[in-house]
Amino acid sequence: MNESRLPKDRLKMSKFKLDALLDITLSINANLPTGELLKKYESILREDLGIGKILLFKHSGKWEVLLNSGFSDSLQKTVSVERDLLRFGEITTEVNELSFKGVDVIIPVFNNNIPVAYALIGDIDEEGEGMSPVIKHLHFIQTISSIIVVAIENIRLFNESLKQEAMKRELELAARMQTMLIPDNRNLQGDERISVRGFYNPHYEVGGDYYDFLPLSGDVVGFCMADVAGKGISAAFLMSNFQATLRALFTADSDLGDLLRKLNSVVVVNSSGERFITLFIARYNFVTRTLEYVNAAHNPPVMIDLKSFTSTMLKQSCVGVGMLDEMPSVGRETITITNPTKIVCYTDGLSELKDENGNDLGASPIVKHFTNSGAAADNLKSLIEDLDINTSNPRLFDDISLLAVEIH
């Protein structure tokens, strides 16, 4: 080669490198999508540097192929980065392993001394005798590969953050909607005959617990506690539909067995048989002083007689809502309440809390805090403080809901 051409060739190549880096940088600043950046990268290597084949692996949680231009699919599928490439800490120009058939050069790309990509190139243009001119520019290829890989990873992380932010907003909206389903204590309509107080602590932003208190007529009230199997947004959506159905069907004279069967049909359809709901639902008549209830596989509420200070568990009487396509017999129980009484409903987020020996607490905190002559609202506050039930407590692993009904 003519010696006089060398300075001009070097100058030309230096200008090409600067122009290529500038073009890539401007493209990144212009927020071009990943596909466009890869096209520019491929064009620089194949058209400007005469490289016939490029295989680029990138790490983003796991190793994946970011670009395959010219290599066979079999090579892409055969090469394992963990097994075959992590041992390459420097640019390698002598690749003799059969597993790298057609590969002339392996170029590792590092970020903070951690491998983030591997560029495999092959079918390099040869100009006459001696070393291919591409070999002289492998560090440039490594640099531009690093810029491209880091830029694409930043695009991925940015898009991921946008998705997370959108999901966060959706969860916040769902949480606000669900809060509207749970009665505010200020709106629980008690009077001189009955006092009602509720508490709701979701494990995530939204949960699958629900309770309600409904004046059904001048002399009849209804109340319930329900829990969707599972947590999160899907449980919350199923519960919101369940609440609307229950409120539409629950009346002062509706048959509780028929009500449960109708609710069961709705849950089976809406959950496609994948979820079920445990439910305690009761109706109290102030004139006859009778309490009629159905416990559909829910935690048995605690009923405390405030004259004898004895407690009774309102135990299960039928399967959960949505457990079976058709609900079998529904066991309805009727109790006459002659003395002032507290009835405390709760979900398994409370009963499955552990004591110091790792055993379930069950209903013992309710018996402990409510078996007295104090107001149910004060009892509930005392229980919450004693167990430190709040959203920041790491011991809590499920939604916790309580509904205290005090019949005077």
Image: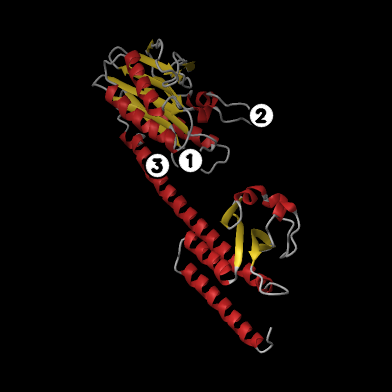
Q: Secondary structure at mark 3?
A: helix
Three-letter code, disc 3: Ala
Disc 2 marks which residue? 357
Q: Residues within 10 Å of mark 2 (few under 14, many from 20)?
A: few
- The quadrant of the rendering that contains the C terminus is top left
Residue drawn at 53 percent across, 77 percent down: 19
Q: Secondary structure at mark 2?
A: loop
Q: Residue furthest front?
A: 128
Residue drawn at 65 percent across, 71 percent down: 134
Q: Position of residue 60 (x, y in %)?
A: 58, 54
- The nearer-to-camera label among 2 and 3 is 3
Q: How many marks?
A: 3
Residue 204's disc is 1
Q: Which of 141 and 360 lies nearest the eye of the viewer?
A: 141
Residue 175's disc is 3
Q: Secondary structure at mark 1?
A: loop
Q: Earlier in the sequence, mark 3 or mark 1?
A: 3
Q: Which of 285 and 300 lies nearest the eye of the viewer?
A: 300
Three-letter code, disc 1: Tyr
Three-letter code, disc 2: Asn
